[in-house]
Image (cartoon, rainbow, N blue to C red):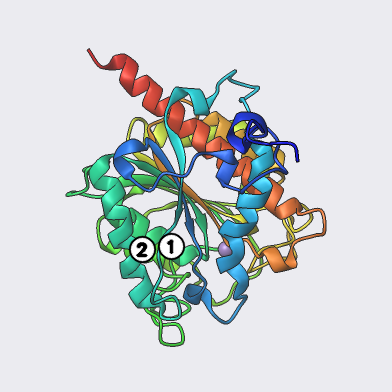
Amino acid sequence: MASNLDAPTHAETMTDFYWWGIPTLFRCEVEEDPSKVDIGLVGIPHSSGNGITERDQHLGPRALRDVSMEYRRIHREFDFSPWDACRVRDMADVPLPNAMHNDRTIKDIEAYFKRLDQAGTRPVSVGGDHSITLPVLRAIAGRGSHISGEPVAVVHFDAHHDSYGEGDVGEEYLGNIEWAGAWARIMCEENLVDPKKVFQIGIRGHKFAQDEGIYSKQAGYRIIEKAEFDTMGVAAVVEEIRNRIGDTPTYITFDLDALDPAVAPGVSNIEAGYPGMTMGQAMGVLQGMWGMNVIGGDVVCIMPSKDAPNKITAINASVILFEQICLIAASLAKQNESRP
Ligand SMILES: [Mn+2]
């Protein structure tokens, strides 16, 4: 019988093929030790923060590990490879032993991200429902955090405000306090953000309540509803983001329902009735943020079980994650250059 002792290994031969081997986010190496990671790609398979709309949001990280394998790219617009600029690693999933209990899980997620904050590892998370953004911000934003040390700016893409509370939808949602529609209020109540530097972009659809979004308005968030976005155009939106935020540490959170259902059908709270963002509009804003001090990001609310057969929602989610990774890598590269 012929010996196959000299047969090549997977690591030696096949790593460039997206369809081969064990899927990781963007084909990155797996590394759970934050001290060895500059940008940590983290799965947060959580769905009890929005438990009655669609529950399969916890399947998001698995879907993105599959689809993003094919999207390990070099940025065409900026001729930039984030993979060469810094250590981008797949840090696997946040352990969620209380997954069925949202408010306990929010604490588990925060504890996990505090380890990243201590190490200075900037996170890019794959949700999960939108309740995951609050515990990430509690770890990396506001006074006492290592990564920012001050209230941060937030660029929030969404069809919905997610700042719901007493004035509109109610503070508690079927027994959950820190549910997927409350994070954008609580982040301000806890001084994790500078409300004048919070953008809510892409809000659309008929209202849930007469005063829907009242917290956002009273807090002073800059709300750019989709209708206003369409009047302003991408360049004006970018200009306003850059002017208002400047060098303030900035977090990007992207609910895929900000996109039009035609390009993102697999989302948990599909918003029909007014056209959502095109990928061109979303990419225009994200690429317009090049050079800003981006400290982290997430993409949330993907529903793999409702995606189209060609997985277009997951593919577009990969593209948005790639932009976030590039923005953070470029910001880290800039920081290293300016260091004496
Ligand atoms: Mn939403």
Q: Which residue is mark 1?
A: 132
Q: Where residue 292 sits in the image (x, y, percent)?
A: 42, 30
Q: Which residue is mark 2?
A: 109
- Which residue type carries mark 1? Ile
Spot the residue most to the top.
340
Q: Is 34 left, or right, of 340 in this rendering?
A: right
Q: Where residue 21 sits in the image (x, y, percent)?
A: 65, 45
- Which residue type carries mark 2? Ile
Looking at the rendering, which quadrant does residue 86 occupy? Answer: top left
Pick the residue in front: 193 or 72.
72
Q: Where residue 309 sits in the image (x, y, percent)?
A: 82, 59
As helix, strand or loop, the secondary structure at mark 2 comes to: helix
| Residue sitting at x 44%, y 71% | 164
Q: In this view of the protein, can residue 162 be seen by the observer?
A: no
Q: Tell me the quadrant of ligand 1.
A: bottom right
Q: Where residue 285 sits in the image (x, y, percent)?
A: 58, 36
CA separation in Å, label 1 and label 2: 7 Å
